[in-house]
Image (cartoon, rainbow, N blue to C red):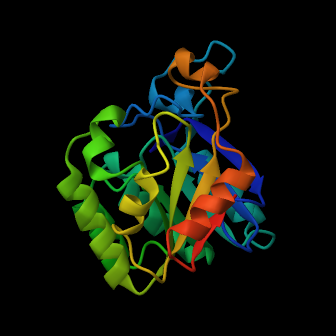
Amino acid sequence: MTFSGFIKTDLVNYPGLVAAAVFTGGCNFRCPYCHNPEFVVPGSDPAYSDETYTEEEILAYLTRRSAMLDALVVSGGEPTLHPDLPAFLRRVRPLGLKIKLDTNGSRPAVLKSLICSGLVDYVAMDIKAPFEKYGLFGFADTAAIGKSIGILERSGIGHEYRTTCPKGLLEPDDFPKMAKLIGNNAKWYLQTFNPRKTLDPEFGRASAYTEAELRAIAASVGRAETEVR
């Protein structure tokens, strides 16, 4: 398996743990605000090196540093598009690291298989918008998204949902609709949109909700587990 990005020490993406993070290339969404365009469309960011990392390189590093790491985060792009992902995770498991998967929820069968096989400990799933707006992200199979939510809610493993919040693409009345899609007990993070780097250059001029506006939205949706970050 080949990876398009690698962070050797990550203190943010796995709650409470010191992790390494790897990023797979390619995605079946086209979120205009995506802040990792180089992982979605290779060559889309001229400032980004096309350097890649082999599975062997990643595993060698994790083996050397396993005593100082708690976890591995697998992000993207969309990791579940890669058929060799389960085999890679099976090689990580003996190192004793927790494994977190970041996913857009578009491949519920893969998600279920990874969970049932004991290959992931924590999942962060994107909720892009109310289902009627998913076409704006280049993906129309909202039934798949609903199935992935159901799988996570029944899984018994730690999980969270997250939504990036640019103005215009998401209106205030979209948030209660999204809140109804997910369980009341899982964390839902509303993430501030950063226009510094976007897949669609036009979105570099899009407006962001302020932290105060997002906190007001979080308070209004009626979920105790909705937070802003």
Viewport quadrant of the C terminus:
bottom right
Look at the picture and state if 58 lies above or below 94.
above
Q: Is residue 178 visible?
A: yes
Which residue is at the far top?
A: 46
Identify which residue is drawn at 42% across, 48% down: 128
Image spot of residue 74 (x, y percent): 53, 55
Identify which residue is drawn at 62% across, 73% down: 97
Viewport quadrant of the N terminus:
top left
Image spot of residue 172 (x, y percent): 49, 50
Image spot of residue 134 (x, y percent): 30, 42
Q: Is residue 103 visible?
A: no
Identify which residue is drawn at 50% across, 20% down: 200
Look at the picture and state if 115 lies above or below 39.
below
Pick the residue in front: 173 or 104: 173
Relative placement, left or right, of 197 versus 155 is right
How many labels, in total? 0
Quadrant hosting residue 224: bottom right
Image spot of residue 210 (x, y percent): 71, 45
Quadrant hosting residue 62: bottom right
Relative placement, left or right, of 84 versus 9 is left
Identify which residue is drawn at 45% across, 57% down: 175
Look at the picture and state if 205 lies above or below 154.
above
